[in-house]
């Protein structure tokens, strides 16, 4: 019905009709799918939550004399330096050197890779400490220097897995508190945590990846980024509801963007008591309304998206596959508590629905102004694969 | 009426039975939320006092005469709305709904200090340190 080129022409002329994933629901209810598909050019989706599989490549430029960095720490957080001389990769979940972790259980994990990434984006000064064994061409063996993001040649965020299509709801059926990446879960099902933007979430608005693919332009914390690959653990053949929407983890995206153009309020280091550190990121993805089918998917409502409640005291750890029950996002987002197996359970969330709406609005404005074009994927995301586990087979060649 | 107060004690004041005087001399109902009174250290006491307005006024005058600093604005727990990302992780951990959803449609979280009983669970649970405490 519409092509990417036609939609981009409208965006460039400032005439594109753009609505958020929330607004489109009422719009289609009022106008009907057929009319709305003709009128609407783009629907903006968004999410803001912890994305552990995140990090960045940094290039420091060469010191005088040169140094081939073999070990590096930024603000005492270890970076990976097994790449070229002054390139390093800083991961979001790396702990700070000497963090007691869970030796003082439950650990506090006040500072780590995610916090360094937040500091870099905020333009704050950080300390690089780097070591080397020294070579003929790279004689320097040690560097300690202060720097900020503007001193770097490149700071490119490279995230192997972001934007999980859907996610587990975590609960604790045991008699003691469990500390997880989904927050602190109180004993005997007193609370639960979910982590999805529901009807705002990018991949829940495009459940079969018809517009979001490899090469899709994305808004990554305010910077223009791209989907560079399927995300790790991409699992399109998961269980889906009648509407095609996955009821579990399923699809994921690998994202990259220039960190120098990011906005600090959408890159936030996170500390999870008893678990570790991470980073929360804001992501927006535009969905071009090419036809009625694509539009129909974007009208998905919170109540039509289900999620599996999993016991994080045992079933998650041991991969039993047991699902206690299924709940929907209208219950999770709109209520303070929910009844699970006859018990009233308080609800927590790690995904910010409020920020997701804000990001969808920002992206909408950028598209309306003609600043953000939609892009046709260079390749689709895989549709016929599942995720495998690790079979422990014994090491040392035995 | 009920008033929530943060009292700050100097090093040499921590041996005085202040709460006793508030109850006995001014007839106030005292509800202590949090306290740290250690000899030879600066101490604090966060409490609610209920009673007749004039009795509370007299009690406040007594506290001032004892050189106890009264803070009626900063009550010991701070929630920084600019640090908060509105995720709502705190909601199931706050026992009094002091942290609550102020606008359901946009799921905006706010903090009402008057409901806060200073259990500090928000400080333990916020991944972004949006909540903090004085003298924690």
Image (tube, coloured by chain):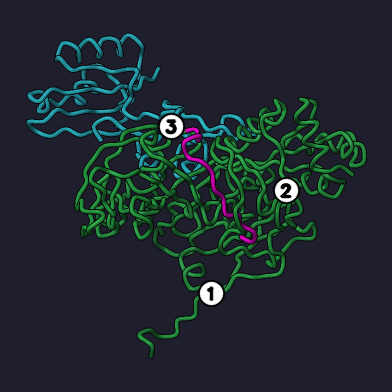
Chain colours: A green, B cyan
Q: Residue at x 30, y 14 (%)?
A: B56
Q: Residue at x 14, y 15 (%)?
A: B66
Look at the numbered discs 3 and 2 and tell me whether their residues touch, using CB distance below 8 Å: no
- For disc 2, the chain is A
- For disc 1, the chain is A
Categorize mark 1 by other alpha carbons within 10 Å: few (<14), some (14-19), many (20+). few
Name the mark nearer the viewer: 3 or 1.
1
For residue A389, which numbered disc appears in the image?
A: 1
In the rendered image, the quadrant that contains the C terminus of chain B is top left
Q: CA distance from mark 3 to mark 2?
A: 29 Å
Q: Are marks 3 and 2 on the same chain?
A: no
Q: Which residues are magenta?
A: A249-263
**Which element type, helix, strand or loop, lies under badge 3?**
loop
Q: Residue at x 90, y 39 (%)?
A: A32
- For disc 3, the chain is B
Q: Which residue is mark 3?
A: B83
Q: Which residue is mark 2?
A: A205
> Where residue A306 appears, x then y in whole percent?
69, 55
> Where residue A326 appears, x then y in whole percent?
66, 60
> Where residue A115 appears, x then y in whole percent?
37, 43
């Amino acid at each position: 019905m519409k092509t990417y080129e036609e939609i981009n022409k409208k965006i460039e002329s400032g005439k594109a009709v753009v609505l958020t994933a929330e607004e489109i629901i009422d719009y289609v209810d009022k106008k009907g799918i057929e009319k709305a598909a003709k009128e609407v050019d783009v629907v903006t989706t968004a999410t803001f939550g912890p994305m552990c599989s995140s990090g960045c490549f940094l290039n420091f430029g060469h010191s005088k004399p040169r140094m081939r960095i073999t070990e590096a720490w930024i603000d005492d957080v270890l970076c990976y330096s097994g790449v070229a001389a002054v390139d390093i990769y800083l991961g979001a979940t790396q702990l700070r050197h000497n963090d007691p972790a869970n030796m003082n259980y439950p650990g506090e994990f006040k500072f780590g890779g995610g916090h360094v990434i937040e500091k870099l984006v905020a333009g704050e000064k950080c300390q690089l400490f780097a070591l080397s064994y020294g070579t003929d061409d790279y004689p320097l063996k040690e560097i300690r220097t202060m720097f900020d993001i503007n001193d770097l040649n490149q700071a490119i965020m490279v995230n192997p897995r972001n934007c999980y299509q859907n996610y587990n709801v975590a609960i604790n059926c045991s008699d003691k508190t469990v500390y997880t990446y989904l927050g602190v879960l109180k004993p005997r099902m007193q609370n639960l945590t979910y982590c999805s933007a529901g009807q705002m979430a990018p991949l829940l608005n495009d459940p079969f990846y018809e517009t979001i693919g490899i090469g899709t332009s994305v808004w990554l914390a305010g910077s223009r980024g791209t989907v560079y690959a399927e995300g790790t653990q991409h699992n399109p053949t998961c269980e889906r509801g009648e509407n095609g929407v996955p009821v579990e983890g399923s699809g994921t995206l690998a994202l990259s963007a220039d960190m120098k153009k990011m906005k600090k309020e959408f890159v936030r280091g996170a500390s999870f008591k008893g678990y570790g550190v991470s980073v929360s990121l804001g992501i927006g993805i535009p969905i071009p309304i090419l036809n009625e089918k694509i539009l129909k998917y974007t009208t998905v409502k919170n109540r039509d998206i289900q999620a599996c409640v999993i016991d994080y005291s045992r079933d998650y750890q041991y991969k039993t596959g047991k699902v206690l029950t299924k709940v929907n996002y209208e219950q999770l987002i709109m209520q303070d508590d929910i009844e699970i197996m006859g018990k009233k359970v308080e609800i927590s969330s790690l995904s910010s629905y409020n920020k997701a709406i804000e990001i969808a609005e920002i992206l909408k404005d950028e598209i309306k102004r003609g600043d953000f074009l939609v892009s046709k994927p260079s390749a689709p995301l895989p549709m016929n694969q599942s995720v495998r586990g690790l079979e422990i087979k014994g090491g040392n060649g035995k | 009426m009920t008033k929530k107060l943060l009292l700050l004690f100097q090093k040499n004041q921590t041996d005085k039975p202040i709460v006793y005087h508030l109850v006995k001399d001014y007839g106030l109902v005292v509800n202590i939320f949090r306290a740290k009174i250690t000899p030879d250290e600066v101490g604090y006491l966060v409490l609610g006092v209920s009673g007749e307005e004039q009795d509370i006024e007299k009690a406040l005058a007594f506290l001032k005469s004892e050189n106890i600093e009264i803070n009626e604005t900063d009550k010991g727990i701070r929630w920084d709305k600019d640090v908060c990302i509105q995720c709502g992780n705190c909601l199931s951990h706050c026992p009094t709904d002091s942290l609550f959803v102020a606008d359901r449609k946009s799921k905006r979280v706010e903090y009402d200090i008057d409901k806060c009983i200073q259990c500090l669970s928000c400080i333990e649970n916020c991944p972004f340190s949006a909540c903090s405490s004085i003298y924690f």
